[in-house]
Amino acid sequence: MSEKPFPHPSVFLGEKRLERIKGYRVHESRTPEKPLRVLTPSQTIGPFFALGLVGSSEDDLACREPGGARAQGTPIVVSGRVTDEAGKPVRKALIEVWQANRWGKYEHPDDTTDAPLDPAFKGWGRMLTDSEGRYRFRSIKPGAYPNPGYDDWMRPPHIHYSIFAAGLMQRLITQLYFPDEALNDIDPILNGIENLDARASLVARRLRADQAGEQGVEAYGFDIVLSGAAQTALFVDG
Ligand code: FE
């Protein structure tokens, strides 16, 4: 039998789970036990926050400019709704997304892997929810990549999310994962969420092909619930 490359998360029990993943440090900025010291008082962003922040075609991560060359990889469309605890739509929420390219490479100086860059791939996008709380963006399915500093930890394909809206005092961040990815079952960050419903909330739903609105495109649904019992699992910024 071949040796397993890294341990299954079920062997890491309780609160110390993440700390036992080969040197992973749970430090205070990731999971603060007491309120962080606030130097500048927070104030609401007000109703005009989003005005002028989002340009055309910023909801397309798979090209540098409208009509330009398309990134390599499996084209995807991700759509969903942002709702509050009562299920009411959150309109004009600013959603920002960023991800690795099809080979699991970020265009970032800290990504020192040998995986190739894709000159056509922008890798980030931003959009506003409409009056029904809906959002949608185009991209390509990201590749898995080795987590820097851990030679035996491959992050499953994922898309990073930041959500900011009127009424929030700080942005919310989380990650979308794809269904049926074997690496999901052994990713310490995803499996660090103890509540199974909360963990499942981060795995996108595969939608019917016709829901993508384009041929040959995989469609995924990812709804975001900002609070309450069905809240999407959100991470502390940092
Ligand atoms: Fe990432």
Image (cartoon, helix red, strand yellow):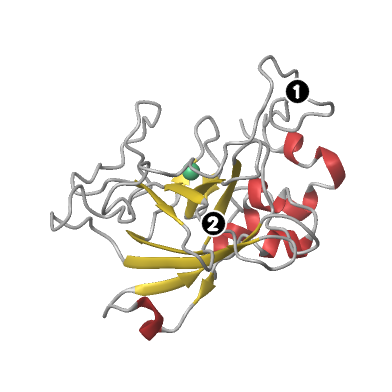
Residue 222 in view in this figure: no
Tell me the element at label 1: loop
| Quarter of the figure with the N terminus | bottom right
Residue at the image point whose x is 74% and y is 51% from the top: 193
Asked if 145 appears above or below 33 in the picture, the reply is: below
Tell me the element at label 2: strand
| Quarter of the figure with the C terminus | top right
Residue at the image point whose x is 77% and y is 63% from the top: 196
Amino acid type of the residue that numbered disc 1 sits on in the rendered structure? Leu
Q: Residues within 10 Å of mark 1 (few under 14, many from 20)?
A: few
Q: Residues within 10 Å of mark 2 (few under 14, many from 20)?
A: many
Q: Which residue occupies the foreground of this view, 49 or 73?
A: 49
Q: Earlier in the sequence, mark 2 or mark 1?
A: 1
Where residue 69 appears, x then y in whole percent?
Answer: 13, 55
Numbered label attached to residue 176: 2
Left or right relative to 211: residue 206: right
Where residue 197 appears, x then y in whole percent?
Answer: 75, 65
Amino acid type of the residue that numbered disc 2 sits on in the rendered structure? Leu
Residue pushed farthest top? 39
Asked if 42 appears above or below 211 in the picture, the reply is: above
Left or right relative to 123: residue 91: right
Where residue 232 appears, x then y in whole percent?
Answer: 68, 57
Asked if 148 appears above or below 120 in the picture, the reply is: above
Numbered label attached to residue 6: none
Residue at the image point whose x is 36% and y is 35% from the top: 113
Asked if 37 appears above or below 8 in the picture, the reply is: above
Mark 1, residue position: 36
